[in-house]
Image: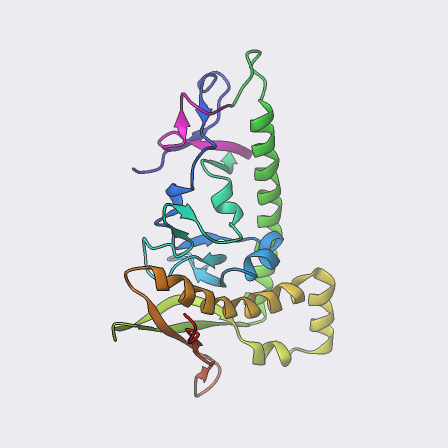
Amino acid sequence: MKTNYVPLDKEKHSALKVSVQHGFEFAKETHLASATMREFAQIASCMPIAFIKDQPKGSFHTIAMLGLEQNSNMYFNDNKWVGHVMPLNIQRYPFDVRPDGDKLGVFIDENSPLVGEEGESLFTEAGEPSDYLKNRQELLGEIANSEMITQRFVAKVVELGLLDPLQLNVQYASGETRNVTGVFTINEKRVNELSDEVTLELKKSGFLGAIYTVMLSLAQLNRMVQLSSTTDKPIRAIQMKLIDENAAEAETAPAAEKSPAE
């Protein structure tokens, strides 16, 4: 069902409730989720972080990779979320924070299966936000603030020319292979070539730690290989190739292999 986000209105939605008893089924076909700097460290312990480029605007955004194919989430299996970390962009659903006139406002997806007559009330009988809604508003506020910082981080990474396309060669147990493109990552060689002055600036802003966290998160491709073992398309290995646009030849990283014990 297509999403239908509308501004949350205490009169229009006075009787609306949101179910909190679910297994996050709504995310089972989500293969990419927005990720902000606030959660980079946690996400990097569970799933890869990468950059995607909006077309036709050409702007970059940071995302958590949940799957290697559209409509396929490796962190959702057996009707439940199986990752030990969940991106805030998944947690905040069916709410979102969006521009509403000259300010940011809370929106809700009226078509969400979580929205209806059962669950947590959004407003009290007096028309005030319920404790549940206050909690959601606080989460949305944190996400909005972190997104602004993340935008500055992305702008700096792009300004310094640190991003390059990443190609993933996926080798399935069946013998089938496919290349996954459209994502970008940070070129470590170029990071190491930055001047001491720029490196210090990145460190003071907190961006240097975020840069290394993003690069280290790619090790979680191994986890995706492991998670695929219980799907109908188990993966044998994932080969990473950084397409260095400033070099004549591409750099190739070690493959993510399934361990013999699996």
- If the image is split into quadrants, where does the N terminus sit? top left
Question: Number of labelled discs?
Answer: 0
Residue 102 in view in this figure: no
Is residue 11 depicted above or below 218 in this figure?
above
- If the image is split into quadrants, where does the C terminus sit? bottom left
Is residue 249 depicted above or below 46 in this figure?
below
User: Residue at 57% across / 81% down in the picture?
Assistant: 189
Q: Quadrant of residue 54?
A: bottom left
Is residue 209 depicted above or below 171 in this figure?
above
Q: Quadrant of residue 239?
A: bottom left
User: Residue at 42% across / 23% down in the picture?
Assistant: 118
Relative side of 262 to 179, left or right: right
Name the one closer to the observer, 61 or 256.
Answer: 256
Residue 55: x and y in percent read 38, 58
Relative side of 102 to 237, left or right: right
User: Residue at 56% across / 65% down in the picture?
Assistant: 214
Q: Which residues are magenta?
A: 103-120
Name the one closer to the observer, 153 or 176.
Answer: 176
Colour mode of the rendering? rainbow
Q: Residue furthest front?
A: 261
Name the one closer to the observer, 161 or 107.
Answer: 107
Is residue 48 depicted above or below 165 in this figure?
above
Residue 81 in view in this figure: yes
Relative side of 111 to 261, left or right: left
User: Residue at 45% across / 29% down in the picture?
Assistant: 19
Residue 5: x and y in percent read 41, 34
- Residue 114 is inside the magenta segment: yes
- Residue 179 is inside the magenta segment: no
Relative side of 47 to 31, left or right: right
Residue 203: x and y in percent read 72, 66
Q: Residue furthest bottom?
A: 248
